Image (cartoon, grey):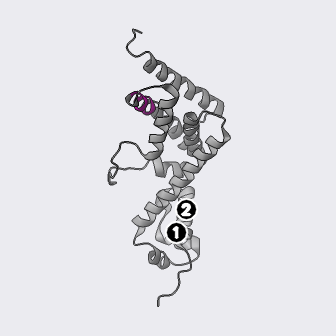
């Protein structure tokens, strides 16, 4: 019978997330994990097939943290639900820049594309809420979301990389300006401007 592992998968994943928070995805090595857990790298490979499997679990755990930011922002009810998701995205970028980079700024060209839809389930919900609130068609709501999200991602990227710093009021007002401008364009589509 093999010796009982000193650590659970969850403890190793949490240690890997903490290493990522401190030094980015590249900081997660078997040796660094072993040092953080006070052991050799060997026990880690008793819990995971390889480092790629561990990295997938780190991404999943990080995604859960990010979704926690969205839930907190929506529970605070300071902004409408659609806007609160954008505010949470930017706040996550500012408070967890390395985790933000892992989720939203990594090279995905080699990742398997398993989606049957262009949108993940959380985005589908956002677009449905947007349609309900605005009365836009599915196509219009998707286009408004895409254009709006390009703007939100731009701010978040600047925040995550410390390129620029914005206060929350400026971010909120800017998001409203962009959203309302885009919404107005779709609402008056076909009219001469």
User: How would you rate the neighbour count of disc 2 (Cα within 10 Å): few for under 14, some for 14-19, many for 20 or more?
Assistant: many
For the C terminus, the image quarter is: top left
Q: Where is residue 180 in the image (x, y as percent from the top left)?
A: 53, 22
Category of crowding for the residue at label 1, using alpha-carbon neighbours closer than 10 angstroms: few (below 14), some (14–19), many (at least 20): some
Name the disc covering residue 12, or none: none
Q: Specify whether residue 162 is in view.
A: no
Give the residue at x 63% y 46%: 72
- Residue 187: percent from the left, percent from the top? 45, 18
Q: Nearer the viewer, residue 98 or 134?
A: 134
Residue 144 in magenta? yes
| Local secondary structure at mark 2 | helix
Quadrant hosting residue 37: bottom right
What secondary structure do most residues of the magenta stretch adopt?
helix
* Residue 98: in magenta span: no
Region of the chain picked out in magenta, as a range: 140-146
Q: Which mark is residue 19?
A: 2
Q: In this picture, is 57 found above or below 156?
A: below
Q: In the rendered image, which residue does mark 1 sit on?
A: 32
State whether residue 186 is above or below residue 104: above
Going 54% across and 37% down the picture, which residue do you hit?
86
């Amino acid at each position: 019978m093999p010796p009982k592992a000193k650590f659970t998968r969850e403890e190793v994943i949490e240690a890997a997330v903490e290493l990522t928070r401190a030094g980015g995805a590249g900081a997660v090595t078997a040796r660094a994990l072993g040092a953080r857990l006070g052991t050799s790298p060997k026990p880690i490979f008793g819990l995971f097939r390889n480092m790629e499997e561990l990295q997938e679990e780190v991404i999943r755990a990080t995604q859960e943290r990010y979704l926690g930011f969205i839930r907190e922002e929506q529970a605070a009810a300071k902004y409408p639900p659609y806007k609160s998701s954008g505010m949470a995205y930017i706040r996550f970028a500012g408070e967890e820049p390395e985790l933000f980079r892992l989720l939203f700024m990594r090279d995905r060209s080699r990742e398997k594309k398993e989606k049957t839809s262009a949108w993940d389930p959380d985005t589908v919900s956002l677009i449905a809420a947007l349609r309900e609130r605005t009365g836009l068609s599915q196509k219009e709501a998707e286009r408004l979301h895409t254009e709006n999200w390009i703007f939100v991602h731009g701010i978040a990227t600047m925040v995550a990389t410390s390129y620029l710093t914005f206060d929350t009021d400026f971010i909120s007002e800017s998001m409203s300006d962009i959203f309302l401008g885009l919404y107005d364009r779709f609402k008056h589509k076909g009219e001469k401007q």
